[in-house]
Image (spheres, coloured by chain):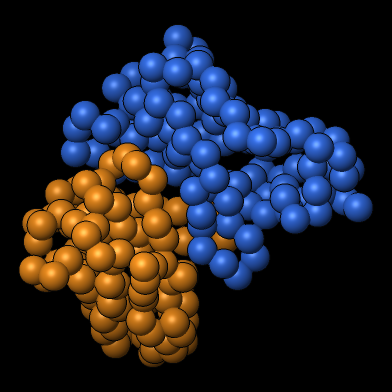
Amino acid sequence: GENVEQHPSTLSVQEGDSAVIKCTYSDSASNYFPWYKQELGKRPQLIIDIRSNVGEKKDQRIAVTLNKTAKHFSLHITETQPEDSAVYFCAAANSGGYQKVTFGIGTKLQVIP
Amino acid sequence: KAGVTQTPRYLIKTRGQQVTLSCSPISGHRSVSWYQQTPGQGLQFLFEYFSETQRNKGNFPGRFSGRQFSNSRSEMNVSTLELGDSALYLCASSFAGREAGYTFGSGTRLTVV
């Protein structure tokens, strides 16, 4: 089955700096890669996703990149703000088959004001 | 429209007891997935239901079971509770599953004493 590795497990950055979270996956059939943000005591929420036919996707201060050859994808947050502090989860799924969405272990991001 | 509703929000049970958790997906969503979230273990996939059929199952013991009703509401049952079952149980719904992003419920916090 799919295995998703995520690092770092914790990340502290100064407000205004950039943050990068990296994930690798094992199943070459995976073609859908969502990212979720979970604030303390709240539910995970989808913040951005990317499909395998796209190498990069941006949404304001957030961007995701995907390297299918190397089987890794990354989340980039620029100009970080204190409200970006949360746990971020990457995930991988095969939209063409009835397979579960596999999540990474999560990265706890702390933005220091 | 209403989001994903999970009940109850909190539950305290004794070892050996059984518990049933409920999840009502977003109207029109036919796929419901269940995850166990514990510190350090991330989001562990339990199972996914689509149109009343279990489509995928994670690596959990048989004590964990579920079902889905014709209105897409889903229940998860854990029998013979163990201390290690203490966790946040999240359900997520999507239109067809596997992609298009899950919408998570707020979860049920289960504590086994």
Residue at image x 72%, y 50%?
A84
A3 relative to A35 in the view: left or right: left
A61 or A93: nearer the viewer: A61
B75 or B41: nearer the viewer: B75
Q: x, y percentage for residue B25? A: 28, 66
Q: Colour of chain A?
A: blue
- Quarter in which the N terminus of chain A is drawn: top left
Q: Quadrant of residue B84?
A: bottom left
Vertical position of residue A109 compared to residue A61: above or below: below
For the colour orange, the matching chain is B
Q: Quadrant of residue B73?
A: bottom left
B3 or B109: nearer the viewer: B3
Q: x, y percentage for residue A53? A: 39, 17
Residue at image x 19%, y 57%?
B30
Residue at image x 63%, y 52%?
A87
B69 relative to A103 in the view: left or right: left
Number of numbered tags placed on the structure image: 0
Q: x, y percentage for residue A27? A: 34, 24
Q: Is residue A22 visible?
A: no
Q: Is residue B54 visible?
A: yes
A10 relative to A56 in the view: left or right: right
Residue at image x 54%, y 20%?
A56
Q: x, y percentage for residue B113? A: 46, 87
Vertical position of residue A52 compared to residue B68: above or below: above
| Residue projecting furthest to the top | A69
